[in-house]
Image: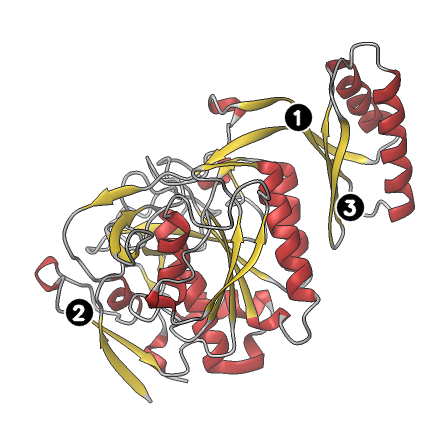
C-alpha cells in the first residue's frame, strides 16, 4: 500500500559542512592531535596470539622507557572481524620503538595520533520540508513547492529493521520517535547518556521519526559517540565496535541493520579498517562525505573502500559548495535546510550538511531492506540496489569524478 504523507520537514544536516561534522584534528589540515595518545592498527591476518604477544611487548617497551613520565601505556584494545587495534598513552621513545616494530616485525599497519572530533551544524530559519519528497520523486522540486510536498512510500516503512546511529546521543523521549528509539551504548561513561548537542536527535529523526523519517517504522539504537560536539578517533572506533558486536551477537539482526555515521575526520587508517571489517561481517555502513568542499578521499570514514558515502544537494539538486565530492562518494541526498526532530522542547529545527544527507540514505537502506526482504541483506546487495534505483545525471555540479546519482526510493514499487 502506498502512503502519501505531507513532509512536515525533512532537511537533514550535519556531518562536516563548514559547520557540520566531526572534524578530527587532521594533522595535515591543522587538526588537533591529542598529546601522547595514539592508536596502533595491526595488519590483517595477525593472529590473536600474535596480537597478545605484541601488546605484551608494547607494555614492556613502555615500562622500560626512561622518558615515559606519567604516561599510562597500553590502553583499550579493539577487535572487529580481522581488524585489530589498540590505544595507548605513550612517550616519544615508546612510539619510536613501536614504529620501528612496524618495519622489523611486520605486525603493525599504522601508528596514528589520536585526534579530537567535533559535531557542528548550520541552523536555518523557516519551514522548508522537501527532503522526503526528493527521495520519492524522479521529478525535480521547485522552491515554490517547499511547503506542499508529499512523501510517497510503502507502509512497510522499515518495519523490523534497526538503525545504529553513532552521534551525539538521541532524545529518545521525543514524541516523534513513538518509543522506537532505544539506548544502546555510551562511550563516555562519565557523562549522562543524553543528547547534549542536538545533532544526534536531528539525524535520528531523519532516519526513522514518525514525522521526518524515511523509515518510519524502524527501531533506532542510540550509540553516543561524541560528548557534545567533541569526540576522538578512538571513541568512534569504540562506538563502531560496540555496534558490530551487538548486531552480530543478536540472532537475525546482521542483514536487518544499518550503521549510520554522520561524522568525519582526516583520512585515518584505523577508522577505515574498522569500517571495512564491519562490512566484511555483513553490516552496511553509511557515512557522510564531509563538508569541506573538497575530495572526500581526504576524509574518514568517507574514504573507507566499503563505506557507502553520501554527498549533499539542495532543493534544486545543486551540490552546495561545502559538500565534499569525488570517487569516494556513492550517492547524493538532501542535505541543505533539512527539518527534523530537535533536542529542545520536543520541537523541530533546520540543519544543513552531509550529516543531514547521510540519514536520508541510512533510512532508505532500511526502507528497501524491509520492502524487498532477504535479497538485500548483504552490504553489496543493498548498495547495488540503491545505485540501481538512483536518479542519474540530475545533480548539478556534482564535482570532479563524482558519480551523478541522486537517492530514490522507487516509489514503493517492488
Q: Residue furthest bottom?
A: 1
State the residue position of label 3: 44
Up the image or down, 321 lies above or below 359; here it is above
Question: Tag on residue 37?
Answer: 1
Give the x, y percent position of residue 298. Answer: 50, 35
Judge left or right: residue 411 versus residue 191. Answer: left
Of circles 3 and 2, the one toward us is 2
Residue at the spot of label 2: 149
Q: Is residue 93 left or right of residue 393?
A: right
Q: Which x, y percent locates residue 319?
A: 28, 47
Occupied quadrant, residue 155 = bottom left
Asked if residue 25 is positioned above or below residue 331 in the image, the reply reads: above
Q: Residue at x 29, y 47 (%)?
A: 352
Mark 2 nearby-residue class (10 Å; few <14, some 14–19, many ≥20): many
Name the element at disc 2. loop
- Of pointers 3 and 2, the one earlier in the residue sequence: 3
Amino acid at each position: 500500500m502506498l502512503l502519501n504523507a505531507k513532509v512536515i520537514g525533512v532537511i537533514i544536516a550535519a556531518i562536516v559542512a563548514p559547520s557540520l561534522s566531526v572534524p578530527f584534528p587532521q594533522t595535515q589540515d591543522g587538526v588537533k592531535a591529542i598529546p601522547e595518545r595514539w592508536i596502533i592498527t595491526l595488519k590483517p591476518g595477525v593472529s590473536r596470539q600474535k596480537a597478545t604477544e605484541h601488546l605484551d611487548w608494547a607494555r614492556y617497551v613502555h615500562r622500560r622507557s626512561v622518558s615515559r613520565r606519567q604516561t599510562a601505556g597500553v590502553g583499550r584494545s579493539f577487535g572487529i572481524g580481522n581488524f585489530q587495534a589498540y590505544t595507548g598513552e605513550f612517550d616519544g621513545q615508546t612510539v619510536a620503538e613501536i614504529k620501528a616494530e612496524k618495519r622489523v616485525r611486520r605486525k603493525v599497519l599504522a601508528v596514528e595520533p589520536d585526534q579530537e572530533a567535533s559535531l557542528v551544524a548550520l541552523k536555518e530559519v523557516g519551514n522548508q520540508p522537501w527532503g522526503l519528497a526528493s527521495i520519492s520523486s524522479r521529478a525535480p522540486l521547485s522552491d515554490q513547492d517547499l511547503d506542499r510536498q508529499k512523501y510517497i512510500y510503502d507502509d512497510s516503512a522499515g518495519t523490523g529493521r534497526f538503525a545504529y546511529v553513532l552521534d551525539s546521543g538521541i532524545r529518545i523521549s521525543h514524541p516523534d520517535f513513538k518509543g522506537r528509539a532505544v539506548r544502546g551504548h555510551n562511550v563516555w561513561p562519565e557523562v549522562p547518556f543524553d543528547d547534549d548537542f542536538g545533532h544526534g536527535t536531528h539525524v535520528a529523526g531523519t532516519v526513522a521519526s514518525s514525522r521526518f523519517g524515511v523509515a518510519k517504522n524502524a527501531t533506532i539504537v542510540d550509540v553516543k559517540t561524541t560528548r557534545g560536539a567533541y569526540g576522538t578517533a578512538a571513541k568512534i572506533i569504540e562506538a563502531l565496535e560496540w555496534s558490530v558486536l551487538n548486531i552480530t551477537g543478536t540472532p537475525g539482526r546482521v542483514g536487518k541493520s544499518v550503521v549510520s555515521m554522520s561524522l568525519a575526520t582526516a583520512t585515518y587508517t584505523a577508522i577505515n579498517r574498522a569500517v571495512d571489517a564491519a562490512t566484511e561481517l555483513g553490516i552496511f555502513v553509511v557515512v557522510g562525505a564531509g563538508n569541506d568542499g573538497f575530495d572526500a578521499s581526504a576524509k574518514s570514514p568517507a574514504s573507507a573502500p566499503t563505506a557507502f558515502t553520501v554527498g549533499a544537494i539542495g532543493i534544486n539538486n545543486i551540490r552546495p559548495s561545502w559538500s565534499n565530492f569525488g570517487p569516494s562518494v556513492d550517492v547524493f541526498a538532501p542535505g541543505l535546510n533539512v527539518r527534523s526532530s530537535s533536542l529542545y522542547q520536543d520541537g523541530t529545527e533546520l540543519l544543513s550538511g552531509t550529516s543531514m544527507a547521510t540519514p536520508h540514505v541510512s533510512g532508505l537502506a532500511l526502507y528497501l531492506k524491509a520492502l524487498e526482504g532477504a535479497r538485500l541483506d548483504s552490504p553489496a546487495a543493498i548498495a547495488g540496489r540503491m545505485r540501481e534505483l538512483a536518479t542519474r545525471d540530475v545533480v548539478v555540479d556534482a564535482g570532479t569524478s563524482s558519480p551523478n546519482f541522486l537517492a530514490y526510493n522507487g516509489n514503493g514499487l517492488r
